[in-house]
Amino acid sequence: MEFFVNKNSIVRQIWGKSDTILFIFAGASAEFALNKAVDWLYFTGKLPADPIGRLFSTVRYARRIVFAPLEEANKAIDTMRQIHTAVEQNRGATIPDWAYRDVLFMLIHYSIASYELLEKKLSPEEKEEVFNVFYRVGVRMGLKELPPTYKEWLPVREAHLMADLRKSEYTADLFKQYKKHLGAMRFRVLIEGQKLVVPDRVRELLDFSDFSLLTPVVPVYKVSRLMKIDWLLKNILLPADYKDQISELDVQPGKV
């Protein structure tokens, strides 16, 4: 059976661990809040009502594609595009192509940044592999002006960061909602986690310091994973409502 992502791909390793995915989620939640097209996510009302659940749904779609057979993955991508088309019809406007690219670019950046934070540096070939998976998602969605290689993507990503992000009333409201849904302590952890993976432009717009309180914690967490007690830290830090969903993100060795 042909899969959308090869079974021995580094992308399956990245998206097969809940802690790596949580950092992808953390970084994306910061950048989402700054995107000039975030008003589209407010249009349905789903984002402010349940920002954590909304971001998890994006993660689940991406993860479903990573582990699915080719035909099933293509159907998931087509469904994702149809959902957005329905929203466009309801609003009577079109989501700009750059906004779709921005989301795709987030998945590329945070996949690499999160894995390198928790595991090891990726080789140029592995980074190319990560890029290629999401490039193919973009092509299937019919996105235009996608750079064909990781190396060509890097300056385009920088240009998007400069052109498509701004601090707005949506930014303030989204972070307010994050705090409301996570609680003060977990919200603080989210902010410190975001500092570890967001690009400089996002850090600058959100007035983040260069230092994260989690920097000295990451090596301890890596040891806790080796000792199989990382679940204890996750239970402390994660909202009870999402614990089952998070545990389901872990793929058993041999199935990745």
Image (spheres, rainbow, N blue to C red):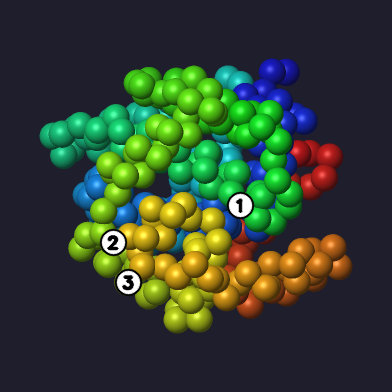
Q: Quadrant of residue 163?
A: top left
Amino acid, disc 2: Thr
What is the count of numbered marks?
A: 3
Q: Circle 3 sits on which residue?
A: 176
Is 108 placed left or right of 169 in the picture? Answer: right
Q: Circle 1 sits on which residue?
A: 114
Q: Position of residue 224 (x, y in %)?
A: 79, 69
Amino acid, disc 3: Lys
Q: Up-down: is 96 above or below 214? A: above
- Which residue is at a point 50% across and 62% down the rendered structure image? 194
**Secondary structure type for disc 3:** helix
Give the crowd class for mark 2: few <14, some 14-19, many >=20 residues within 10 Å. Answer: many
- Which residue is at a point 30% across and 49% down the rendered structure image? 165
Q: CA distance from mark 2 to mark 1?
A: 23 Å
**Secondary structure type for disc 2:** helix
- Residue 24, can we see it? yes
